[in-house]
Image: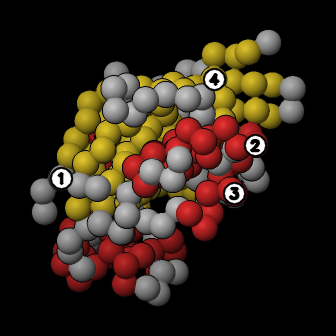
Amino acid sequence: MPIYKTITIPDGLIGVWHLSESSADLLPNFSSKELSDPAFLNYTHEKRKAEWLATRVLIKQLIGLDFSITYTCTGKPILNHANYKYLSISHAYDFAAVILHKHLNVGLDIESISRNYNPIEKRYLSEDELIQVNRIPKYQCLYWCAKEAVFKLVPEDGIEFRNQIQIPSFNPETEKEFYARFIEGARELVYKLHFQIFSEHCLVWVIDTPSEIH
Protein backbone atom coordinates (compact mmCIF):
# COMPACT_ATOMS: atom_id res chain seq x y z
CA MET A 1 0.00 0.00 0.00
CA PRO A 2 2.48 2.65 -1.08
CA ILE A 3 1.75 6.37 -1.10
CA TYR A 4 1.19 7.46 -4.69
CA LYS A 5 2.79 10.89 -4.27
CA THR A 6 4.23 13.14 -1.56
CA ILE A 7 4.94 16.85 -1.84
CA THR A 8 7.00 18.70 0.74
CA ILE A 9 6.00 22.31 1.34
CA PRO A 10 7.39 24.80 3.89
CA ASP A 11 6.25 23.56 7.34
CA GLY A 12 3.90 21.08 5.73
CA LEU A 13 3.29 17.88 3.80
CA ILE A 14 0.96 16.75 1.04
CA GLY A 15 0.20 13.09 0.45
CA VAL A 16 -1.78 11.37 -2.30
CA TRP A 17 -3.06 7.80 -2.02
CA HIS A 18 -4.28 5.65 -4.90
CA LEU A 19 -7.63 4.18 -3.90
CA SER A 20 -7.08 0.60 -5.01
CA GLU A 21 -7.90 -1.33 -1.80
CA SER A 22 -11.24 -2.37 -0.38
CA SER A 23 -12.20 -1.46 3.15
CA ALA A 24 -11.51 -5.07 4.16
CA ASP A 25 -7.94 -4.74 2.85
CA LEU A 26 -7.38 -1.63 4.98
CA LEU A 27 -8.99 -2.75 8.24
CA PRO A 28 -5.88 -4.56 9.62
CA ASN A 29 -4.18 -1.14 9.90
CA PHE A 30 -6.59 -0.06 12.63
CA SER A 31 -7.31 -0.85 16.24
CA SER A 32 -10.81 -1.63 17.47
CA LYS A 33 -10.81 1.76 19.22
CA GLU A 34 -10.08 3.57 15.96
CA LEU A 35 -12.81 1.63 14.18
CA SER A 36 -15.34 2.64 16.84
CA ASP A 37 -15.14 6.24 15.60
CA PRO A 38 -18.74 7.35 14.88
CA ALA A 39 -17.52 9.09 11.71
CA PHE A 40 -16.55 5.66 10.35
CA LEU A 41 -19.50 3.72 11.75
CA ASN A 42 -21.97 6.08 10.09
CA TYR A 43 -20.75 5.13 6.62
CA THR A 44 -22.80 2.48 4.84
CA HIS A 45 -21.30 2.64 1.35
CA GLU A 46 -18.15 0.66 0.62
CA LYS A 47 -16.45 3.49 -1.26
CA ARG A 48 -16.88 5.94 1.63
CA LYS A 49 -15.54 3.39 4.10
CA ALA A 50 -12.48 2.75 1.94
CA GLU A 51 -11.87 6.50 1.53
CA TRP A 52 -12.05 7.09 5.28
CA LEU A 53 -9.66 4.25 6.02
CA ALA A 54 -7.22 5.07 3.20
CA THR A 55 -7.05 8.71 4.26
CA ARG A 56 -6.02 7.75 7.78
CA VAL A 57 -3.49 5.16 6.59
CA LEU A 58 -2.03 7.93 4.41
CA ILE A 59 -1.75 10.28 7.39
CA LYS A 60 -0.18 7.52 9.51
CA GLN A 61 2.49 7.00 6.87
CA LEU A 62 3.16 10.74 6.71
CA ILE A 63 3.35 11.63 10.43
CA GLY A 64 3.03 8.42 12.47
CA LEU A 65 0.29 6.94 14.59
CA ASP A 66 -0.14 9.52 17.32
CA PHE A 67 -2.93 11.72 15.97
CA SER A 68 -6.68 12.02 15.92
CA ILE A 69 -9.17 13.89 13.77
CA THR A 70 -12.25 15.71 14.97
CA TYR A 71 -14.69 17.88 13.05
CA THR A 72 -16.22 21.33 13.38
CA CYS A 73 -19.98 21.81 13.31
CA THR A 74 -19.69 22.54 9.58
CA GLY A 75 -17.76 19.32 8.92
CA LYS A 76 -14.27 20.73 8.51
CA PRO A 77 -11.55 18.42 9.92
CA ILE A 78 -9.35 19.35 12.86
CA LEU A 79 -6.03 17.53 13.27
CA ASN A 80 -4.85 16.75 16.80
CA HIS A 81 -1.08 16.10 16.63
CA ALA A 82 2.03 17.27 18.46
CA ASN A 83 3.56 19.04 15.45
CA TYR A 84 0.98 19.31 12.68
CA LYS A 85 -2.04 21.41 13.60
CA TYR A 86 -3.97 21.91 10.37
CA LEU A 87 -5.47 19.49 7.89
CA SER A 88 -7.49 19.42 4.69
CA ILE A 89 -8.79 16.26 3.01
CA SER A 90 -10.10 15.54 -0.47
CA HIS A 91 -11.24 12.49 -2.43
CA ALA A 92 -11.65 11.82 -6.12
CA TYR A 93 -12.77 8.55 -7.67
CA ASP A 94 -9.25 7.11 -7.80
CA PHE A 95 -7.37 9.13 -5.18
CA ALA A 96 -7.42 10.45 -1.64
CA ALA A 97 -5.28 13.47 -0.79
CA VAL A 98 -4.36 15.36 2.38
CA ILE A 99 -2.40 18.47 3.25
CA LEU A 100 -0.92 18.94 6.74
CA HIS A 101 0.63 22.12 8.12
CA LYS A 102 2.35 23.00 11.37
CA HIS A 103 1.25 26.62 11.75
CA LEU A 104 -1.28 27.73 9.14
CA ASN A 105 -4.73 26.75 8.02
CA VAL A 106 -4.85 25.00 4.65
CA GLY A 107 -7.23 23.92 1.89
CA LEU A 108 -6.82 21.20 -0.73
CA ASP A 109 -8.89 19.58 -3.45
CA ILE A 110 -8.37 16.81 -5.98
CA GLU A 111 -10.70 15.96 -8.85
CA SER A 112 -10.78 14.04 -12.11
CA ILE A 113 -10.41 15.94 -15.37
CA SER A 114 -12.82 13.46 -16.97
CA ARG A 115 -15.72 14.65 -14.81
CA ASN A 116 -18.40 16.46 -16.81
CA TYR A 117 -18.33 20.05 -15.54
CA ASN A 118 -20.58 21.50 -18.27
CA PRO A 119 -23.89 21.11 -16.38
CA ILE A 120 -22.56 23.03 -13.35
CA GLU A 121 -20.19 25.51 -14.97
CA LYS A 122 -22.47 28.52 -14.51
CA ARG A 123 -22.87 27.72 -10.82
CA TYR A 124 -19.15 27.98 -10.05
CA LEU A 125 -17.66 30.10 -12.88
CA SER A 126 -18.21 33.83 -13.38
CA GLU A 127 -18.82 35.25 -16.86
CA ASP A 128 -15.13 36.16 -17.18
CA GLU A 129 -14.08 32.71 -15.97
CA LEU A 130 -16.37 30.99 -18.46
CA ILE A 131 -14.44 32.79 -21.20
CA GLN A 132 -11.07 31.95 -19.62
CA VAL A 133 -11.93 28.27 -19.23
CA ASN A 134 -13.64 27.96 -22.65
CA ARG A 135 -14.99 24.51 -21.74
CA ILE A 136 -11.51 22.99 -21.75
CA PRO A 137 -11.86 20.03 -19.32
CA LYS A 138 -8.47 20.51 -17.66
CA TYR A 139 -9.20 24.17 -16.99
CA GLN A 140 -12.72 23.44 -15.77
CA CYS A 141 -11.25 20.95 -13.32
CA LEU A 142 -8.51 23.30 -12.19
CA TYR A 143 -10.89 26.18 -11.48
CA TRP A 144 -13.26 23.85 -9.62
CA CYS A 145 -10.45 22.51 -7.44
CA ALA A 146 -9.19 26.03 -6.78
CA LYS A 147 -12.56 27.22 -5.53
CA GLU A 148 -13.05 24.09 -3.43
CA ALA A 149 -9.61 24.56 -1.85
CA VAL A 150 -10.36 28.17 -0.93
CA PHE A 151 -13.78 27.15 0.41
CA LYS A 152 -12.12 24.57 2.66
CA LEU A 153 -9.62 27.16 3.87
CA VAL A 154 -11.85 30.04 4.87
CA PRO A 155 -14.03 29.83 7.98
CA GLU A 156 -17.18 31.10 6.31
CA ASP A 157 -19.87 28.66 5.21
CA GLY A 158 -22.45 28.96 2.46
CA ILE A 159 -20.06 30.60 0.01
CA GLU A 160 -21.19 31.29 -3.56
CA PHE A 161 -18.37 29.98 -5.73
CA ARG A 162 -19.40 32.03 -8.78
CA ASN A 163 -19.40 35.40 -7.04
CA GLN A 164 -17.30 35.14 -3.88
CA ILE A 165 -14.27 33.22 -5.20
CA GLN A 166 -12.79 34.69 -8.36
CA ILE A 167 -9.83 33.42 -10.38
CA PRO A 168 -7.94 36.07 -12.38
CA SER A 169 -6.83 34.90 -15.82
CA PHE A 170 -3.61 32.84 -15.95
CA ASN A 171 -1.98 30.27 -18.22
CA PRO A 172 -2.00 26.76 -16.69
CA GLU A 173 0.38 25.57 -19.40
CA THR A 174 3.23 27.84 -18.28
CA GLU A 175 2.41 28.84 -14.69
CA LYS A 176 2.49 26.60 -11.62
CA GLU A 177 0.97 29.15 -9.27
CA PHE A 178 -2.09 31.32 -9.61
CA TYR A 179 -4.36 33.47 -7.47
CA ALA A 180 -7.89 33.55 -6.12
CA ARG A 181 -9.84 36.50 -4.73
CA PHE A 182 -12.17 35.74 -1.84
CA ILE A 183 -14.87 38.36 -1.36
CA GLU A 184 -16.80 38.58 1.91
CA GLY A 185 -18.86 41.76 2.18
CA ALA A 186 -16.52 44.75 1.92
CA ARG A 187 -13.46 42.61 2.56
CA GLU A 188 -11.40 41.12 -0.27
CA LEU A 189 -8.51 38.70 0.29
CA VAL A 190 -6.11 37.35 -2.31
CA TYR A 191 -4.70 33.85 -1.92
CA LYS A 192 -1.85 32.20 -3.83
CA LEU A 193 -2.69 28.68 -5.03
CA HIS A 194 -0.43 25.87 -6.19
CA PHE A 195 -1.34 22.95 -8.40
CA GLN A 196 -0.14 19.74 -10.01
CA ILE A 197 -1.76 17.67 -12.74
CA PHE A 198 -1.18 13.90 -12.87
CA SER A 199 -3.02 10.76 -13.97
CA GLU A 200 -5.81 12.90 -15.46
CA HIS A 201 -6.44 14.58 -12.10
CA CYS A 202 -5.96 18.12 -10.80
CA LEU A 203 -4.58 18.74 -7.32
CA VAL A 204 -4.79 22.29 -5.92
CA TRP A 205 -3.73 23.56 -2.52
CA VAL A 206 -3.70 26.87 -0.66
CA ILE A 207 -2.10 28.03 2.59
CA ASP A 208 -3.55 30.76 4.77
CA THR A 209 -1.19 33.63 3.91
CA PRO A 210 -3.50 36.10 2.15
CA SER A 211 -2.95 39.68 1.20
CA GLU A 212 -5.85 42.06 1.76
CA ILE A 213 -7.10 44.51 -0.84
CA HIS A 214 -8.34 47.82 0.54
Residue under circle 4? Answer: 190
Callout 4, which amino acid? Val
Residue under circle 2? Answer: 163
Callout 2, which amino acid? Asn
Task: Answer left or right for 14 relative to 105.
Answer: left
Indicate whether 38 appears above or below 76: below
Q: Earlier in the sequence, mark 4 or mark 2?
A: 2
Residue 54 x %, y %: 29, 65
Q: Earlier in the sequence, mark 4 or mark 3?
A: 3
Disc 2, SS: helix
Q: CA distance from mark 1 to mark 4?
A: 32 Å
Q: Residues within 10 Å of mark 3 (few under 14, many from 20)?
A: few
Indicate whether 175 appears above or below 2: above
The N terminus - image quarter? bottom left
Indicate whether 26 appears above or below 202: below
Q: CA distance from mark 4 to mark 3?
A: 21 Å
Q: CA distance from mark 2 to mark 3?
A: 9 Å
Regarding residue 86, the answer to whether it shows in the image is no
Residue depicted at 87% across the width and 26% down the height: 186
Callout 1, which amino acid? Ile
Residue 23 x %, y %: 28, 79
Residue 179 x %, y %: 54, 27
Q: Earlier in the sequence, mark 1 or mark 4?
A: 1
Task: Answer left or right for 147 relative to 24.
Answer: right
Q: Nearer the viewer, mark 1 or mark 2?
A: 2
Residue under circle 1? Answer: 3
Residue that protrudes farthest toward the right in the picture: 186
Residue under circle 3? Answer: 123
Q: Closest to the observer: 184 or 99?
A: 184
The C terminus - image quarter? top right
Q: Are marks 3 and 1 in contact (CB under 8 Å)?
A: no
